[in-house]
């Protein structure tokens, strides 16, 4: 593994027109009502939080993609193509979970042709080790909480507002990483 690289944690999640129901406040005796159309339209989100392995002063980078439907291997390869442009040719170590689309034959063949990308695998079903899972949680607890949109565009707009909120707070992505218990930079030894 190249030590001068971006360590990138990607992940996918879904959103729909069904609201993410969360607690809220209301005047005493007035139970809040959440009215929505029973609609199963879904969109999928792909996000990737990147941390530089050797330069702790570089800000974390967040790459985000939203599409109707779900992700399969060709759609994920398209996301990785965008990530290649996003990182402008710098080395990337992608720390991916065991989803079958991540390790399919066509994905491995595509990755083998990439000189900028190395894949590392997370342990089987270990969402607690992926900081992107905390990003999804943050979005769903704030911008998407109790959102009863009429169209997927409403959900997409709220999601993009949340991504903007996270991007403008440089400490938030680092807190997601810290919450996993993982570190990229070894502590300096005491004298």
Image (spheres, rainbow, N blue to C red):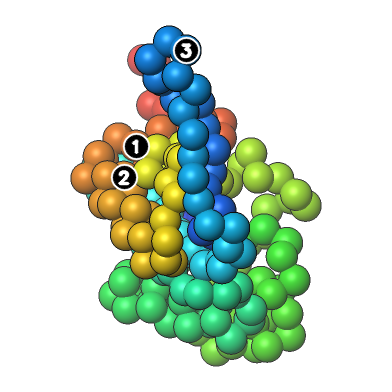
Can you say which quadrant of the picture contains the C terminus? top left
Crowdedness near tag 1: few (<14), some (14–19) or many (≥20) residues, C-alpha within 10 Å: some
Task: Pick the quarter of the image with the N terminus.
Answer: bottom right
Mark closer to the observer (2, 1): 2
Q: CA distance from mark 2 to mark 3?
A: 35 Å
At label 3, counting other C-alpha atoms closer than 10 Å, the crowd grade (few under 14, some 14-19, many 20 or more) is: few
As drawn, the label of residue 29 is 3
27 is higher (above) or lower (below) than 157:
above
The relative height of residue 104 versus residue 9 in the rendered view (above or below) is: below
- Judging by the rendered image, the residue that carries numbered circle 1 is 172
Indicate which label's residue lies in the foreground, 3 or 1: 3
Q: Is residue 91 visible?
A: no
Q: CA distance from mark 2 to mark 1?
A: 6 Å
Is residue 153 in sight in this rendering?
yes
Left or right: where 55 falls relative to 187: left
Give yes or no for contact between labels 2 and 3 (Cβ–Cβ under 8 Å). Answer: no
Q: Residues within 10 Å of mark 2 (few under 14, many from 20)?
A: some
Q: Quadrant of residue 142?
A: top left
Lower sequence index among marks 3 and 1: 3
Residue at image point 60% right, 73% down? 70
Q: Pick whichever of labels 2 and 1 is earlier in the sequence.
A: 2
Residue 103 lies, in percent from the top left, at 71, 74
Residue at disc 1, secondary structure: helix
Res 111 → quadrant = bottom right
Q: Earlier in the sequence, mark 2 or mark 3?
A: 3
Of residue 182 and residue 187, the one placed in the foreground of this image is: 182
Query: Residue 27's x, y, as percent?
Result: 38, 15
Question: Tag count in the figure?
Answer: 3
Q: Which mark is residue 166?
A: 2
Tell me, yes or no, whether the two marked residues, 2 and 1, touch with CB atoms within 8 Å.
yes
Rendered view: 191 above or below 5: above
């Amino acid at each position: 593994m190249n030590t001068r690289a971006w360590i990138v944690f990607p992940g996918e999640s879904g959103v729909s027109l069904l609201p993410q129901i969360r607690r809220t406040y209301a005047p005493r005796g007035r139970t809040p009502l959440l009215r929505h159309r029973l609609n199963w339209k879904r969109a999928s989100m792909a996000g990737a939080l990147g941390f530089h392995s050797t330069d702790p002063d570089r800000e974390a980078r967040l790459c985000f993609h939203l599409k109707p439907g779900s992700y399969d291997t060709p759609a994920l390869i398209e996301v990785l193509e965008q990530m290649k442009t996003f990182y402008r040719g710098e080395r990337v170590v992608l720390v991916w979970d065991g989803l079958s689309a991540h390790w399919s034959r066509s994905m491995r063949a595509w990755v083998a042709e990439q000189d900028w990308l190395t894949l590392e695998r997370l342990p089987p079903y270990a969402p607690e080790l992926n900081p992107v899972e905390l990003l999804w949680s943050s979005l769903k607890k704030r911008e998407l909480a109790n959102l009863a949109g009429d169209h997927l565009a409403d959900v997409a707009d709220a999601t993009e507002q949340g991504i903007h909120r996270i991007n403008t707070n440089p400490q938030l992505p680092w807190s997601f990483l810290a919450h996993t218990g993982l570190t990229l930079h070894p502590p300096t030894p005491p004298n």
